[in-house]
Image (tube, grey):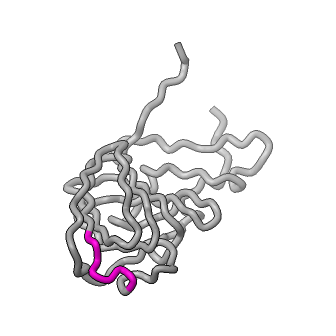
Amino acid sequence: MSEYKTVFGGLNDFTPGGVDAIDDNPKNYVFSNVFDVASRSAPYERVAVGKNLEYVIEVLRAEGQSPWYACAHDEFALCMDGEVEIHLVKPDDADVLVDPDSEGAVVLDEVPDGRKMGRIVLRRGHQALLPGGAAYRFEAGAPAVILTQTIQGPATVERWAEICQSESRPAA
C-alpha cells in the first residue's frame, strides 16, 4: 500500500502546493494552484495557468452567466469543481462573428444570431469540446472551476507574477 494519498481539492477546499527547488530558483518553474487562482479571480476572467508556445490552459471561476464567446478553432473545457452548463449557438455567419484566422477566444458584444446547437452539463471531471466557429456561454448556479485548453487570444489574462511561486518554500 502506498504511503501517499491523493486528495483532490476544490474551490472552497484546497491547500496551496509548491515547488521544492533543490539547487535552483523557484522562479525558473511555473507553479500555480488552479483553485487558488480561481478563488482570487473575477467570474469568467480567463487566467492563463499554463503555457506552451501559443497554447494555454486558462482557469475560469464560473459564477452566474458568462458573456458569449466565439473562437475560430476548437477549444476544450474541463470542469474541475462544481457544475457548469454550456450553451452553444451555430452563428448565421461565423466568419463575421470571429476572424477565421484569429487565435484564442473573443468576447462577443451581444447574443449571436443563429441556430441553437444545444447545451452541455459538466460536473467535476467532465470535459466538452467547444467547436471552432460556434458561439458559447457558460452558466453556473454556484461557484465552479473550469479549465480551458485553447490558444492565447484577446480574452486570455496573464498574471504570472501574481499566481506563480517566486520563493523557496520554508523547510518542513
Does the stretch in magenta take in 91?
Answer: yes
Q: Is residue 107 left or right of residue 19?
A: left
The furthest residue to the right: 23
Q: What is the magenta range?
A: 89-95
Give me the residue at 65% from left, 55% from top.
166
Quadrant of residue 8 within the rendered picture: top left
Give me the residue at 40% from left, 40% from top.
9
**Placement of the C terminus among the 4 image quadrants:** top right
**Vertical placement of residue 78 versus 1, above or below:** below
Give me the residue at 67% from left, 52% from top.
29
Q: Is residue 114 left or right of residue 9?
A: left
In this figure, what is the number of numbered marks? 0
The furthest residue to the bottom: 96
Does the stretch in magenta take in 129?
Answer: no
Quadrant of residue 137 within the rendered picture: bottom left
Position in image of residue 33 (x %, y %): 50, 49
Residue 38 seen from this side: no
Position in image of residue 105 (x %, y %): 43, 72
Quadrant of residue 95 within the rendered picture: bottom left
The furthest residue to the top: 1
Give me the residue at 37% from left, 86% from top.
96
Position in image of residue 21 (x %, y %): 72, 43
Residue 33 seen from this side: yes
**Vertical placement of residue 84 versus 4, above or below:** below
